[in-house]
DNA sequence: ATAATCAATGTACTTCCGTTGCATACTTAA
DNA sequence: TTAAGTATGCAACGGAAGTACATTGATTAT
């Protein structure tokens, strides 16, 4: 568990008890989580704290936010050493319409797209929807 | 303007005054519109009516909904004869972080993606974010 | 050790958007 | 002309994101 503290420290986030718990929870869970989700797990903690923890994690590059089309922000841990801002590390996400879970497909990078003149892309979001591995098996 | 009535009729939507106005508005405007947007334009009409009009249009294949990552649903008219559900007609969208406008890039189709075993894709959403043509010019 | 300072958490409240239930007006068909 | 179906209006609800302010906790300097 010292690894988590180190990871947080390295990214400039003070490793408080709450933050370590949330990080641990997200690490064990292999799918993207929403605030409501975390809220249910850590019912004794305040929503705002959890909200701000996610925001802090995001700002410091510990998690990345995912827009899977449900209009609910979800978050997933970044791979160690990944730079989500850079095009090379942008991966696609899969949202299962059956179980409503969203996963990172970190191996599947978003292909480069040529845009019409005048458009300058700084970020990209690619979400596929359908039936996930667990639900189709 | 008879064209609009025909378009609505052809898609099984009764061409009421309100619906024609909304269609006309969306046709003139070349960017995706949100409900709030339409609400401001047609201030005398009720929110719910506008909301349901968009929903009806969507169900009948007259408009398609766009998730541009702002967590606000936006809508744009479908090209005549387009089948948004089909992979071949899935195009990408561009969201300008400067003017907050979202446009359809109907020429830019979403490339086919090979998924890991077990995943079955039925829909795709690709949004690029950055500076749009108007803002970069 | 104490006080001063800054960061993290808690409480409460607000806003925005999407959505639904039910009543009323309008349109179409018998 | 009546009845049935559809569209619109009115009112309210719920979820999620966000913020202001108070309080607690941890760090640092004196
Ligand atoms: Mn991801
Ligand atoms: Mn479009
Ligand atoms: Zn699933
Ligand atoms: Zn712009």
Image (cartoon, coloured by chain):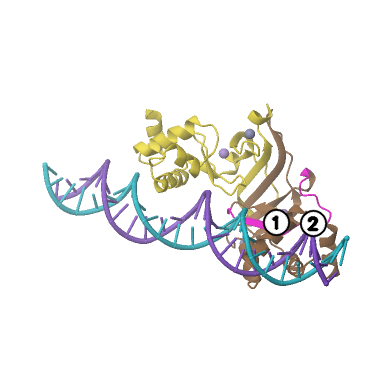
Chain colours: A yellow, B brown, C cyan, D purple
Provide the chain ID for the residue under circle 1: B
Q: Would you identify the image quadrant in which residue B81 lies?
A: bottom right
The quadrant of the rendered image in which ligand 1 is seen is top right
The magenta-colored residue range is B70-87
Q: Is residue B5 visible?
A: yes
Instruction: Determine whether the residue tagged by mark 1 lies in a helix, strand or loop.
Output: helix
Of pointers 2 and 1, the one earlier in the residue sequence: 1
Q: Is residue B137 visible?
A: no
For the N terminus of chain A, give its image quadrant.
top left
Do the residues bearing badges 2 and 1 touch, measured as CB atoms within 8 Å?
no
Name the mark nearer the viewer: 2 or 1. Answer: 1
- Which residue was labeled with disc 2? B79
CA–CA distance between discs 2 and 1? Answer: 17 Å
B26 displayed left or right of A29: right
Tell whether position B129 is magenta.
no
- Which residue was labeled with disc 1? B55
Residue at image point 60% right, 40% down: A88
Task: Tell me the number on the disc at residue B84.
Answer: none
Tell whether position B84 is magenta.
yes
B124 displayed left or right of A52: right
Residue at image point 79% right, 57% down: B79
A136 displayed left or right of A62: right
Q: Position of residue D27 (x, y in %)?
A: 26, 42
Observer-nearest of B66 and C4: B66
Instruction: Determine whether the residue tagged by mark 2 lies in a helix, strand or loop.
Output: loop
Magenta: main secondary structure equals loop
Q: Would you identify the image quadrant in which residue A15 lies?
A: top left
Q: Position of residue B49 (x, y in %)?
A: 67, 64
Q: How many marks?
A: 2
For the C terminus of chain A, give its image quadrant.
top right
Classify mark 2: residues with Cα within 10 Å, few (<14), some (14-19) or many (20+).
some
């Amino acid at each position: 568990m010292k690894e988590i503290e180190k990871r947080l420290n390295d990214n400039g986030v003070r490793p408080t008890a709450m933050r370590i718990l949330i990080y641990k929870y997200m690490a064990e869970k292999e799918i993207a989580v929403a605030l409501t989700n975390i809220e249910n797990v850590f019912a004794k903690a305040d929503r705002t704290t959890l909200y701000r923890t996610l925001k802090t994690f995001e700002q410091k590059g510990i998690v990345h936010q995912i827009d899977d089309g449900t209009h609910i922000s979800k978050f997933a841990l970044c791979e160690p050493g990944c730079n989500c801002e850079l095009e090379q590390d942008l991966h696609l996400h899969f949202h299962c319409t059956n179980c409503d879970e969203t996963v990172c497909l970190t191996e599947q990078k978003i292909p480069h797209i040529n845009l019409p003149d005048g458009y300058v892309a700084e970020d990209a979001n690619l979400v596929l929807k359908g039936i996930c591995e667990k639900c189709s098996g």
